[in-house]
Image (cartoon, helix red, strand yellow):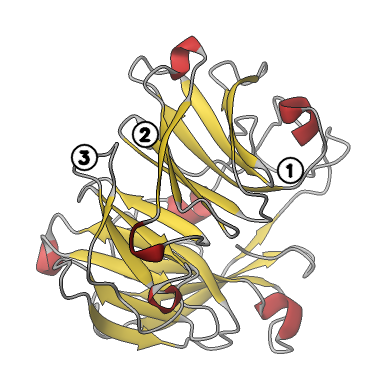
Amino acid sequence: MYRGRFLAAAAVLLSAASVTAPYATQQPPGAGRSARVDSRSVDPVFASQGAVMLSSMSSTDMIGVPTNTSDIWGYTSPSGREFAIIGLQTGTVFVEITDPANPRVVGVIGGATSDWRDMAVYQSYAYSINESGDGIQVIDLSRIEDGTVSLLRTVTDAGLFHAHNIFVNEDSGYAYVLGSNIARGGLLAVDLSDPANPRLERSNWEVAYVHDAYVTTYKKGRNKGREIAFAFTGRLGLHIIDVTDKTNPTTLAHLKYENATYGHSGSLSANGRFLYVNDELDERTNPKVDRMTTYVVRVGDLERPVLTDTIAWDLPLSITTR
């Protein structure tokens, strides 16, 4: 089961009420306000506000050698036990965090050495990709509670060799591979109807390179029944794509929002009206951006997205919103 992205391997609870509170009006929460992080913290390394670090693990703790960490995901077993899934340079690590004060490594799946590795989960399977090789690694989690994870196969259909990212829409039963070596690095739809044997669709969206995406199936309103991909397309900003018909993914809109430098990632509000967009390079390279910034895009009309506001954070510009 999908549990959402973790921001730390040790089950840190984050308070983000200013961003995720229910919507009472058309204005997104947090718009026009500044978020402040308290520099006073009992932890000597990580300043915090509204969050408590319960434990931490280094890569040396996990695999015995120091290495870089990239992305992190999560899995909740049928009995409710929680696991962090962590991408390292040399593979994918599974850590039980049911007791967050005492994390425990339960398995490691090796892979091509890569500075970036990304994972997603569907039912009792994890899918791991990286920027150096392996295609899609299909990992069986059905015995993770017994301390066993196993690599079932690698998917290299259509010459798929490496990719930057993967996203799973549980409602449609499709995964989306992003920034790969095929289809101009665009959006690849992967059928998970047999989750142990993922199958790439023949038609892909190849208009632009896609760095990351948020894909959702609308359950009500004017877009009910439509599966929509919000694709973050680097220097091009944002593309909105209708992927309901896998044989004909269709671009609905393209928005290069103000100060767009490198559209990196984002997430949709609970009511589907707003998309929160993070830009990877604006704070570092755009002289017009003087604070860490999240861009708020109104997407109630999917064909006419509008940048309505920004959320500025009182944090050093050396910190990148991703």
* Residue 181 image position (x, y, % from top left): 48, 70
Discs 3, 2 touching: Cβ within 8 Å: no
Q: Is residue 218 above or below residue 86?
A: below
Residue beneath disc 3: 194
On-image quarter of the N terminus: top left
Task: Specify the amino acid type for callout 3.
Answer: Asp
Quarter residue 251 falls in: bottom left
Q: Is residue 303 above or below residue 11?
A: below
Nearer the camera: disc 1 or disc 3:
3
Residue beneath disc 1: 48
**Residue nearest the observer in this picture, 17 or 264:** 264
* Residue visible at 67% across and 43% down in the picture: 90
Residue 125's disc is 2
Per the image, label 1 sits on a secondary structure element best described as loop
In this picture, residue 70 sits left or right of residue 79: right
How would you rate the neighbour count of disc 3 (Cα within 10 Å): few for under 14, some for 14-19, many for 20 or more? few
